Every structure is written in C-alpha cells, then in structure tokens.
Amino acid sequence: MKSPTGPVIPLYEHSAAASTVYNPQARVCIQCGVRRLALFGVLDPAALENIHYRVPDLRFEPGQPLFAANAPGTSAFTVREGVVRLERGNERGGRRIVRLAGPGDLIGMEAMLGQTYAADALACTPVKVCRLPRVLLDELSGAQPQLLRDMMKRWQAALDEADEWLTELSVGSARWRMLRLLLKLSEFGQPDGQVWLPSRQEMGSMLGMTVETASRLVSALKREGVLDTPDVRHAVLQMPALMAALKTAAQGD
C-alpha cells in the first residue's frame, strides 16, 4: 500500500525466520556482531523490544575524540570496532594513557551516575561505537536487573584493567614494560594478525619512559624477531618470540 507521497515504511519489521516482530532498534542490536560481548548482550529479544530510543552508530577516525575529560557525561559508549585510548592530563601539562578499550568494551560509564567524564577518549584506529544515552540506561536498569548487574561487572572490569596498567606497565625494567604492552596490544589484533602500534611518544606516555628509550626498544625487538612493522602504525607480533622474551625478561627482573 502506498501513500500519495510514496511507500509506507512500517515501524516494525518481521524477521526473516518467523512471525517475530522487532522494532528497528531491537533489530540492529540483535544483528550486532559484538552483541554477545556488549552490554545489551544480557537482554533477550523481548527486552530489546522495549528499547524506544535510537542508539546512534557513530564512526571516528584516528585521533578524533569521542568525549573529553570534565565534560558532562550524557552517554556511555560500546566499542564495536577499533581501539580507543583513555588519557588523563596533569597539572604540569603532561598526559598519560591509562588504558585501552576494544570491541565489546563499555566506556564513559561515569555518565550513568551523572558525573563528568574522567578521561579523554580518543580513537587510535578507525572506530565504530554505539552511543547509549543515560536516560535509556536509567530506564533499562530499573526494568532489567540483569543489565544493572552486568554494568557493575563492567565497571569492576574497567577498574581491574586500570589496576593492571598501573602494576604491569608502570613497574619493572623498560624492556619488561614494553613487552607487556605488546602483549596487551595483541588483545586488539585484527584477523590478519596486525595490531595497532602506538607512536613512540604514545608508548612513552603509556609506559613512563622517554621517546628515545621506546624507539630503541622497538628497534631491538624488531631485530630479535618479536615484531614486524609493515607501516608506522601497525605491527605483526610473533607470539612465540614475544612469550619467550617475556619469560627471559621476567627472570632478569
């Protein structure tokens, strides 16, 4: 049936499998490639049917900010693709990368408490995220206790991740810290085996070392066959060599 101005587009669409009806946002969430890892993964199709807010699918290029520290927290974000870094500045003008986030991670959770964002969030690679408005999360948390529990687990996971950065990437020899960083980056690897490679300055910010030290260590690890660098922003890690180097460095420390 057509209206005088064009086709009628139904608000709800039937799935191809059966007579199940999904509203447009529920359909997007059900078909999402990281749904099993993401916050809404704990919601069944019936619960997703109650989502009446649009969850924008946003894209960011490397270097673009997702949100800024101290800005009002209005939304949380689920990372669908790519790598995001969270940075904080200090009174002396220095900056420190406090953790990385990848597919399935929830960032900006302080927005759920009405707080300002605690860090700057910047895209390291091309990034896709879903923006989750605070009003939606408030509504779902009241109606879906399992969602609230999952958010608490994710909050704890973010705290654990920050603690891991502090303990694993801020102590020990410079070589040990660099190797631990490469191991961490392997968690965000692509299907072709490549990982995002921070700049030497970013490595220094993450590991508390000079740019010169970071450059020297990367060059040494390339000679040792731990990693290859097809370009300045990507690396291919040789995991057996990396794990052997970590074992040796641990014994040395």
Image: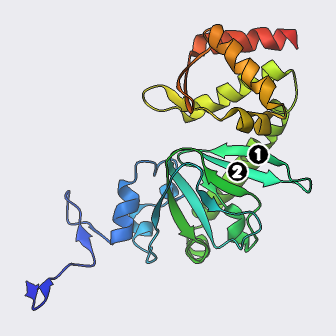
Q: Earlier in the sequence, mark 2 or mark 1?
A: 2
Q: Dot 2, how many residues are within 10 Å of its Cα: few (below 14), some (14-19), or many (20+)?
A: many
Q: Is residue 110 left or right of residue 14?
A: right
In the rendering, at what x and y percent does residue 175 appear? 79, 19
Position of 187 relative to 178 (above/below)? below
Q: Residue 232: in sight, yes or no?
A: yes
Residue at 65% from the left image edge and 35% from the top image edge: 198
The answer to whether marks 2 and 1 mark residues whose Cβ atoms lie closer than 8 Å is yes
Residue at 70% from the left image edge and 50% from the top image edge: 86
Q: Quadrant of the N terminus?
A: bottom left
Position of 152 relative to 33 (above/below)? below
Which type of secondary structure does the marked residue at label 2 adopt? strand
**Residue at the outermost bottom position:** 4
Which type of secondary structure does the marked residue at label 1 adopt? strand
The mark total stands at 2
Q: Residue 38: in sight, yes or no?
A: no
Query: Could you say which disc has been placed on residue 166 in the image?
Result: none
Q: Dot 1, how many residues are within 10 Å of its Cα: few (below 14), some (14-19), or many (20+)?
A: many
Q: Quadrant of residue 110?
A: bottom right
Q: Quadrant of residue 166?
A: top right
Q: What residue did someone put label 1 on? A: 98
**Residue at the outermost front position:** 212
In the rendering, at what x and y percent does residue 224 appear? 65, 7
In the rendering, at what x and y percent does residue 237 appear? 57, 20
Q: What residue did someone put label 2 on? A: 86
In the rendering, at what x and y percent does residue 161 appear? 73, 42
Residue at 84% from the left image edge and 35% from the top image edge: 208
Amino acid found under the numbered disc labelled 1: Val
